[in-house]
Amino acid sequence: MTAACVFVTGVWKSGNHLAYSALNEMGIPGPFNGIAAHLLFGRYAWAKRILRGSKGHEDAAQVGLETDAYVNRRYIGRQVRQLSGRIMGGHAAYSPELEAVLREGEARMICIRRDPRDILISFADWIGGRPDFYMHGDFAPLSREARVAFLLRGGQTAAGPLLPFAAILDRGLGWRQAPGVLQVSFEDLVGPAGGGDAAAQTAALAAIHAHVAAPVPLSDVDASAIYGGSLTFNKGRSRRWRELDDAALVAEIETTLAPQLGPWGYAP
């Protein structure tokens, strides 16, 4: 088993569970815990903030993608050490403080990316069916198009402000730029079962295997077992934003997220 914790992070619905599944096939268990805003929000929020929060930003790392969440760096460091040889999941904002804690613990870091327009639609669908997500109550009464619009534009929720989706993408972009963080795309890793390319999937798996020093030989990894099979897996297809019934909303998505495509590797 690899001696290091493997930290996998991505914007919600960008493909974390594909990466987890690939790592599981390579003999690395998880995910366990997770670095995201939910560390401070949702059920028992008061207890979470006592155990994980910070009295001041000087001893904290910003981890919140969709809203601010400053988590005590000592808590994160303990998790990195305790999860040696296992996966620690994440939907975490990039911050130098979080990167530093992970590097101190010698974690192997992976950033999973996906076309931001597809993430938006998948995230909206996922929230509608996840009562355990701390913002679910704000989205459950809304139509599908209204959920997409709310995520795209941002607004106030019962838990606090939801950032516009472009700002959420900006918060995660540092993982694309940090040295030593392996970049993996959803579209490559999904493979033929999800409408992708077999050669691209093979190359992605080889890159992951080398990056984490996986215990299972690459030749024994079953690529056909990676796609699907997760409670949170949600229609892993591409170009889903074009299926919306509201043409004006489709146009707003394309205009609003156009500046994000290049930095995330999806320039036209």
Image (cartoon, rainbow, N blue to C red):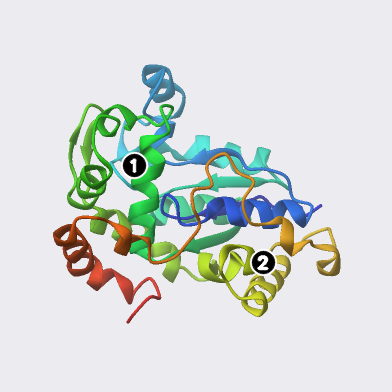
**Left-right relation of 38 to 86:** left
Residue 63: x %, y % from top left? 39, 45
Neighbour class for label 1 at 10 Å: few (<14), some, many (≥20)?
few
Residue 209: x %, y % from top left? 72, 66
Relative to 7, is 258 above or below?
below
Residue drawn 34% across the image and 74% down it: 263
Q: Is residue 107 visible?
A: no
Q: Nearer the viewer, residue 243 or 182?
A: 243
Neighbour class for label 2 at 10 Å: few (<14), some, many (≥20)?
many
CB atoms of marks 2 and 1 within 8 Å: no
Q: Nearer the viewer, residue 131 or 263?
A: 131
What numbered label is drawn on residue 208?
2
Residue 234: x %, y % from top left? 49, 48
Relative to 188, is 151 above or below?
above
Residue 214: x %, y % from top left? 77, 60
Q: Quadrant of the C terminus?
A: bottom left
Q: Quadrant of residue 146?
A: top left
- Residue most toward the bottom? 268
Residue drawn 31% across the image and 32% down it: 135
**Left-right relation of 101 to 127:** right
How far is mark 2 from mark 1, CA to CA? 34 Å
Residue drawn 43% across the image and 41% down it: 36
Q: Which residue is mark 1?
A: 58
Q: SS for tag 2?
A: helix
**Left-right relation of 174 to 167:** right
Q: Amino acid at mark 2?
A: Ile
Q: Is residue 208 visible?
A: yes
Q: Amino acid at mark 1?
A: Glu
Q: Earlier in the sequence, mark 2 or mark 1?
A: 1
- Residue most toward the front? 245
Q: SS for tag 1?
A: helix
Q: Which is more foreground, mark 2 or mark 1?
A: 2
